[in-house]
């Protein structure tokens, strides 16, 4: 079996989500900020979280070698958020996303994790383009995407969505 990659940055460890992360994901996916900025993913029980990991997250890892990850502080191992690369309906280019528990916001962790993941995706997985989407009101996410080198391209609406999203893109070309 292929060893699961662990991406490290100065302060963080980033690893593939596992079934045992269901309780942590349940907490993240039900934070008020997550629901406001990303949306309700209908993950309201441990069983819902386990099912999402089993049917959506792990298959993406099996198919592409990347997907949703858990971010931990290297020094303590404490889990602080998620960061991942996602294939989303309506997007031709893989999307980078991130979210932190509220108590860990404002310390640069989201940018550090997203930058480490993006660097890994380019160097190890050979990705030549990465996109990012966010609602216009989510100014911290806009700043992170721009700091990562993604450039605003246009407003989009995803299939089955109603909200207009800002679409950013980084392309090696």
Image (tube, rainbow, N blue to C red):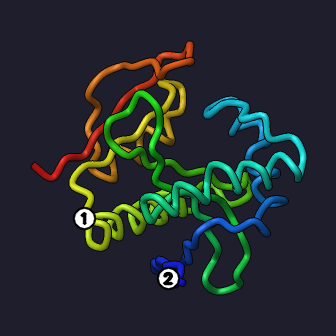
Q: Which residue is mark 2?
A: 2
Q: Quadrant of the N terminus?
A: bottom right
Q: Which residue is mark 1?
A: 126
Locate residue 128 relative to residue 110 in the image: left or right: left
Is mark 2 in CB contact (under 8 Å) with mark 1? no
Q: Nearer the viewer, residue 114 or 85?
A: 85
Residue drawn at (31%, 48%) of the image: 130
In the image, residue 95 sits, relative to residue 7, either above or below, namely above
Residue drawn at (56%, 13%) of the image: 162
Q: Nearer the viewer, residue 4 or 35?
A: 4
Q: Residues within 10 Å of mark 2 (few under 14, many from 20)?
A: few
| Residue 13 locus on image (x, y percent) | 56, 77
Question: Secondary structure under badge 1?
Answer: loop
| Residue 108 locus on image (x, y percent) | 51, 61
Q: Nearer the viewer, residue 88 or 144?
A: 88
Question: Secondary structure under badge 2?
Answer: loop
| Residue 89 locus on image (x, y percent) | 46, 31
Residue drawn at (72%, 48%) of the image: 52
Locate residue 124 relative to residue 49 in the image: left or right: left
In the image, residue 5 sits, relative to residue 54, either above or below, namely below
| Residue 44 locus on image (x, y percent) | 86, 40
Can you tell which quarter of the image residue 146 is in? Answer: top left
Locate residue 159 relative to residue 44 in the image: left or right: left
């Amino acid at each position: 079996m292929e060893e699961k990659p662990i991406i490290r940055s100065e302060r963080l460890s980033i690893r593939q989500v596992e079934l045992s992360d269901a309780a942590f994901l349940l907490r993240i996916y039900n934070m008020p900020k997550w629901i406001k900025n990303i949306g309700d993913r209908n993950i309201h029980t441990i069983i819902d979280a386990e099912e999402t990991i089993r049917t959506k997250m792990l298959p993406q890892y099996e198919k592409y070698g990347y997907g949703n990850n858990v971010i931990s502080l290297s020094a303590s191992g404490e889990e602080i958020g998620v960061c991942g690369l996602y294939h989303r309906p309506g997007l031709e280019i893989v999307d980078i996303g991130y979210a932190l528990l509220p108590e860990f916001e404002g310390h640069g962790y989201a940018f550090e994790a997203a930058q480490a993941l993006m660097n890994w995706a380019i160097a190890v997985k050979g990705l030549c383009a990465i996109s990012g989407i966010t609602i216009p009101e989510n100014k911290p996410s806009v700043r992170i995407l721009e700091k990562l080198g993604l450039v605003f391209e246009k407003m989009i609406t995803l299939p089955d969505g109603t909200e207009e999203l800002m679409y950013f893109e980084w392309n090696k070309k």
